[in-house]
Amino acid sequence: MINKLVENFAAALEGLQDGATLLCGGFGAVGEPHALIEAVIELGARDLTIVCNNAGSGLVGVAALLKAGRARKLICSYPRSSDPQVIDELYAAHKIEIELVPQGTMSERMRAAGAGLGGFFTRVGAETKLAEGKESREIDGQRYVFERPLPGDFALIKAHHADRWGNLVYRKSARNFNPVMAMAGKITVAQVSEIVELGALDPEVIATPGIFVDRVVVA
Amino acid sequence: MTKPLTRRQMAWRAAEDIAEGHYVNLGIGLPTLVSDYVPASREVVFHSENGILGMGGAPKPGEEDPDLINAGKGLTTLRPGGAFFHHNDAFLMIRGGHLDLSIMGAYEVSERGDLANWATNSEKLAPGVGGAMDLAAGAKEVRVLMEHNSKDGAPRIRKACSLPLTGARCVTRVYTNLAVLDITRDGVVVREMIEGLDLVALQKLTEPKLVLANDWKRLTAPEL
């Protein structure tokens, strides 16, 4: 019997090592797996590379992880979201490296990783500072920039409902980066609000099929 | 007497040009106000980068849903016919040329339509780009809504941007508190100016050479 449900956060994060790259879902606080990120802090992994659209809000979730000094590097599109006190402090003190990526490029780089592609050419960022040092090419008269895939050792995501196969549905705009991160994580862990019986999720509305999900934990 | 448009009047003017059936992305800050001035009788589909089409206005008290936010992370609503999707689809729509219009704020726009709206020269605060470069590169049309001059009076419409670019040659129209200007191959064309302003006065507030459209009009807006 396939059963991806795990009993606790230690089991959900088993195998997470220092130096790992963590894909953390969410747009601002919406869709961010706070409980899983708090568990990363408790378990003590450090020297992490965090991939997340924002650098967290207030003192919870990704912001708490950064404040605890566990991240070496942040890959994001917009670090200063609502209440950016933690990233402002770290940035001013030169205590974190930030790789700034246009939002759609960040998402597509993760899709490339999940889709087995070696990268892609995009017009986004061409002729700007963010394209400096990147390979570029003219295609049909337009300038394109080469972007590499962005895989994660772990993807920590949040969903609404799951079944024991790891099929997921989301709520409204809390879907955001979670499905693409599920594809790009070597180990994908979903924090969900409720587990339902296998077969209870409408197959027409499953947004992340269980093949992309390794572990599910309720929080 | 010269009376610049208020921020709400600027948003109203930009909304006047949005056509029925258009798929439109509004940037955070001032452009967010534009949706307030599209009459309900005109069907326009607003796109939000975090996976929403058919976004409505702010929720009424008691109807707030913490899982339903806009690009500025404020609470929003979904109109009947609206849809949710994930980030890749949201940005595929932007990059793939499916959006009719993007309206963004800006620090500077150049005479050839270069846009600078993501980075200042601050060393203290981390810059953020968000979806601005995607919109600049991908929307069918990019229009800018900004004050004509910075707080210290410097022109924000410039021969060349002094700040890092978001995109090159992408802006087609600029709405300011003083004028409506088109970025064209023949230069920056003044379509509308507020009462009390003439081309000489507007030119003093603008770096590149302005061209007055033959059919230029007075820029007026209702009290809002």
Image (cartoon, coloured by chain):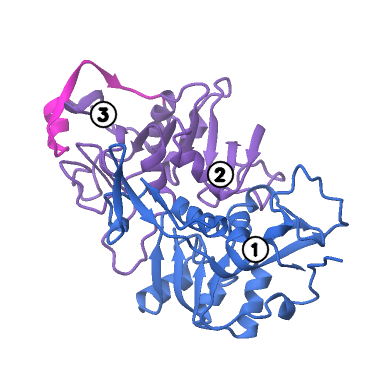
Chain colours: A blue, B purple
The residue sitting at 54% across, 57% down in the picture is A116
* Magenta stretch holds residue A182: no
The residue beneath circle 2 is B89
Mark 1, other Cα within 10 Å: few <14 / some 14–19 / many ≥20: many
Q: Mark 3 lies on which chain?
A: B
The residue beneath circle 3 is B181
Q: Which of B92 and B13 is in front in this view?
A: B92
The residue beneath circle 1 is A157
Q: Nearer the viewer, residue B212 or B96?
A: B96
Q: Look at label 3 and name its amino acid.
A: Leu
Which span of residues is magenta-colored?
A: B198-222
Mark 1 lies on a secondary structure that is strand
The residue sitting at 50% across, 45% down in the picture is B91
Left or right of A141 on screen, residue A213: right
Q: Which chain carries label 2?
A: B
Could one spot residue B180 in this view of the protein? yes
Label tally: 3
Question: Measured from the top left, where is residue B154 in percent x and y?
Answer: 18, 47
Q: Look at label 2 and name its amino acid.
A: Asp
Question: Measured from the top left, where is residue A128 in percent x and y?
Answer: 28, 52
